Each structure stands twice: as structure tokens, then as C-alpha cells.
Amino acid sequence: MTFSTDQFRLDDKVAIITGAGGRGNSIGRAYAMGLAAAGASVVAADINKDGAQSVADEITAAGGQAVASHVDITDRTSVEAMARTAEDAFGGVDILVNNAALMVEIVQTPAMQIDLDAWNRALAVNLTGALNCSQAVAPLMAERGGGKIVNQVSGGAFPASTVYGITKIALVGLTTTLARELGPQKINVNAIAPGNTSSDAGKSITPEDSPFVKMLEASIAMRMRGEPDELVGALLLLCSQAGSWLTGQVIHVDGGWIIRP
Ligand SMILES: NC(=O)c1ccc[n+]([C@@H]2O[C@H](COP(=O)([O-])OP(=O)(O)OC[C@H]3O[C@@H](n4cnc5c(N)ncnc54)[C@H](O)[C@@H]3O)[C@@H](O)[C@H]2O)c1
């Protein structure tokens, strides 16, 4: 088969994006808008009900197809309702982007100081949440002949040095495990590891004038911060026919963070 750029199109595909209703200029919003621009019908899912609705409205206003889903990804019943929303609105699911996470809440938390409830909550959202959504949605993908799962990990997992990093490196483990288990059903499972991204949440944890930012500016090959939209190209590759033979991989979109000295 000859390659065509049409392989990046997602017409007739249905995509669920969790964490799509984030704080203002969020990565989930960029992902939802990007997949819709490529032709997908989108379920914008978030525990933040108004945020999810406003992203769905934005897509619809731009001429795309979208509905909102109010979901808590740690709650199985809620996740199953999210999957039903996709089925009722658009007839099934082809793409799941596990983007919802706790980040601001735990990115500074040392493991030695976290209490057990907060530890369990961090893993419940950032790891078990992705498992819940994958278990709910993979059978629906298999019914349609295959699908794509993309897990949002983080440069902060390479190496993990906070509770947040621990949850994200564990999510890499879920990515490679599900890639092996779901490959025979033609479901690709990959991850994106963004570097420091200028979402409202990202900017709030690394203020421009902080010593951490200055240190990073001096050591990163290209650019310390990227825009949410700069992650969308990698997502499109992983969600489309163009990435048909890619599975079990982590794509680092980070201006060179992973190759820092
Ligand atoms: N911003 C960065 O610098 C950066 C870097 C690397 C990775 N990431 C990852 O990218 C993703 C998006 O980050 P962001 O910067 O847009 O942050 P964000 O806080 O705006 O987005 C996270 C979203 O997850 C939702 N969420 C939290 N708990 C939930 C639950 N139980 N059920 C459903 N939704 C829930 C939140 O409401 C929020 O909308 C996260 O996975 C984050 O870890 C961000």
C-alpha cells in the first residue's frame, strides 16, 4: 500500500479523551480539538463537568462533532457510563486517550512524606483510572475491528523522583503490558511523555523565574517549554492509520529533556 497523508485523517472515528476539561489552556483541550480537527467525533470527558462541556461546545462551534461526559475515572460505574455516552452519541469507540491525571496536586510530593490516603488516590487516578477506561473501552474497540489507546505519561517519570513520577512510570508499565495483551485484537497501545508544557497547570508548577526553570533552560537541547498544541502531532500519529505498526512505545515530545546531560 502506498503511503498517503490521508492516513492521518480520523473521519468516522470516535475518540474519548479523559481530562479534556482541564484548567483553561489544558493539554486535554488541545488533544480533543486536534482529534476533532482531524475528523474524529469526540467525547470530552472530565471530572470537571463544566470544563468538559465547554470543550465539547468549542468543538461543535468550530463545526466538529462532540459531546461531554462527566466522569470520575476511578469509579467503574462512572467509566462505564462514559463508554455508553460514546456508544449512544456516535455508535462505538475507536480511540481512547488516557490523559486525566493528578499533577499539580502531587508533583512536589516526596514519597517519604505522603500519607497513605493521598498515595492511594494518586495511584487510583493516574494508574488505575487508565486501566478502568481501557478495560471498559477495549471490548468496544475489538467489536469494530481494532483501536488505539494512548496513555499520557510524563518526562517527570524519566527518572521518577516524586510520587507523580512514580505514577507515570507505572503507567508506562501498563502501556507495554496492554500493548502485548491487546495487540492480537488490533489495538495499538502507546504513550506520550511530554516535557514541561505551557498548559495553565504546567505553568503553575514551574513559574518562569524559578531556579528550576533557569536550570532546565540551560540544559535542554531545544526549548524547555512546549505548547499543548505541539503534542498533537504525536497524538495524531498514534491515533491514526499512519501509526498502524507502532505499539508499546513511549514518544518523548519534550524539546530534548530526555537527552539532557
Ligand atoms: N503540563 C505539563 O507540563 C505536563 C507535562 C507532562 C505530562 N503532563 C500530563 O498531561 C496531562 C494533562 O495535563 P495538564 O497540564 O493539561 O493538566 P490539567 O490539570 O489541566 O489536566 C488534568 C485533567 O484531569 C482531570 N482529572 C483529574 N482527576 C480526574 C478524575 N478522577 N476523573 C476524570 N478526570 C480527572 C482534571 O479535572 C483535569 O481536567 C496529565 O496527564 C499530566 O500529568 C503534563
Image (cartoon, grey):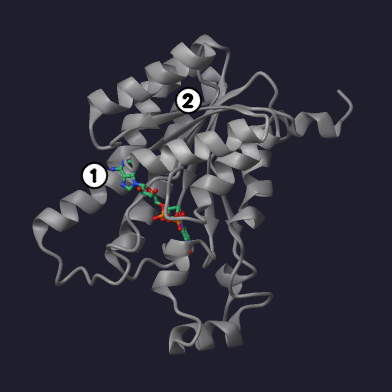
The residue indicated by pointer 1 is 124
- The image shows a total of numbered marks equal to 2
Residue 124 is left or right of residue 190, and the answer is left
> Quadrant location of residue 1?
top right
Residue 208, percent from left and from top: 50, 82
Q: Nearer the viewer, residue 227 or 59?
A: 59
| Residue 245 visible at all | no
Q: Nearer the viewer, residue 249 or 114?
A: 114
The residue indicated by pointer 2 is 182
Quadrant for the C terminus, please.
bottom right
Q: Looking at this view, name the residue that lies furthest to the front.
A: 61
Q: Is mark 1 within 8 Å of ligand 1?
A: yes
Residue 256, percent from left and from top: 63, 70
Q: Identify residue type, mark 1.
A: Ala
Q: Quick one: SS at disc 2?
A: helix
Q: Residues within 10 Å of mark 1 (few under 14, many from 20)?
A: many
Q: Identify residue type, mark 2.
A: Leu
- Residue name at image x 16 percent, y 57 percent: 118
Residue 237, percent from left and from top: 68, 40
Residue depth check, mark 1 versus mark 2: number of the one nearer the observer:
1
Q: Quick one: SS at disc 1?
A: helix
- Residue name at image x 32 percent, y 61 percent: 164
